[in-house]
Image: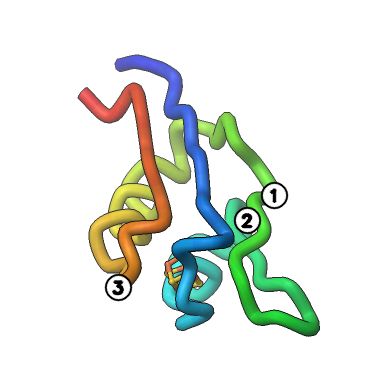
Amino acid sequence: MNQLRVETDPVLCAGSGMCALLAPEVFDQDEEEGTVVLIDDRPAEVRRDAVLAAAERCPAGAIRVAGAD
Ligand code: SF4
């Protein structure tokens, strides 16, 4: 499997917090704005499912993941 590479777009982000809930080791939220803060742009294999779920469920389409196939 390929190494996951994650990008987030705080401008698109709606601050729902779904990503931080599903993958708290990879995503956090800005304390003031509530927008996404990417903690780990090369998450370990063990985080794959959680990262893909976060990207899929992000209501704003603000998470891009490469290396998912
Ligand atoms: S799930 Fe999407 S909209 Fe919600 S905080 Fe994360 S990046 Fe932002």
**Nearer mark to the viewer, of 1 and 2:** 1
Point out which mark residue 39 bears: 1
- Whichever of callouts 1 and 2 sits on the residue coming sooner in the sequence is 2
Q: Residues within 10 Å of mark 1 (few under 14, many from 20)?
A: some
Question: Is residue 36 toward the left or the right of residue 46 in the image?
Answer: right
Vertically, is 21 above or below 57? below
**Which residue carries the number 3 mark?**
59
Instruction: Identify the residue at horizontal 54%, vertical 33% (top origin).
Output: 44
Q: Which mark is residue 57?
A: none
Where is residue 66 drawn, in percent x and y?
Answer: 35, 27
Q: Residue at x 24, y 58 (%)?
A: 56
Position of the C terminus by quadrant: top left
Residue visible at 38% across and 42% down in the picture: 64
Q: Which is more N-terminal, label 1 or label 3?
A: 1
Rendering coords of residue 23 (x, y %): 50, 61
Alpha carbon of mark 1 to alpha carbon of mark 2: how far?
A: 7 Å
Structural distance between the alpha carbons of marks 3 and 2: 20 Å
Image quadrant holding the N terminus, namely top left
- Do the numbered discs 1 and 2 sit on residues whose CB atoms are within 8 Å? yes
Decide if ligand 1 comes within 8 Å of the CB at mark 2.
Answer: no
Residue type for callout 2 = Glu
Q: Which amino acid lies under the numbered mark 1 shown in the image of this protein?
A: Ile
Q: Which residue is mark 2?
A: 25
Pointer 2: residues within 10 angstroms few (<14), some, or many (20+)?
some
State the SS at label 2: loop
Q: Residue 38's x, y, as percent?
A: 64, 51
Task: Choose between 15 and 54: the one closer to the eye.
Answer: 15
Coordinates of residue 21 in the picture (x, y in percent): 50, 75
Q: Is mark 3 within 8 Å of ligand 1?
A: yes
Mark 3 Cα shell of 10 Å, populated few (<14), some (14-19), many (≥20): some
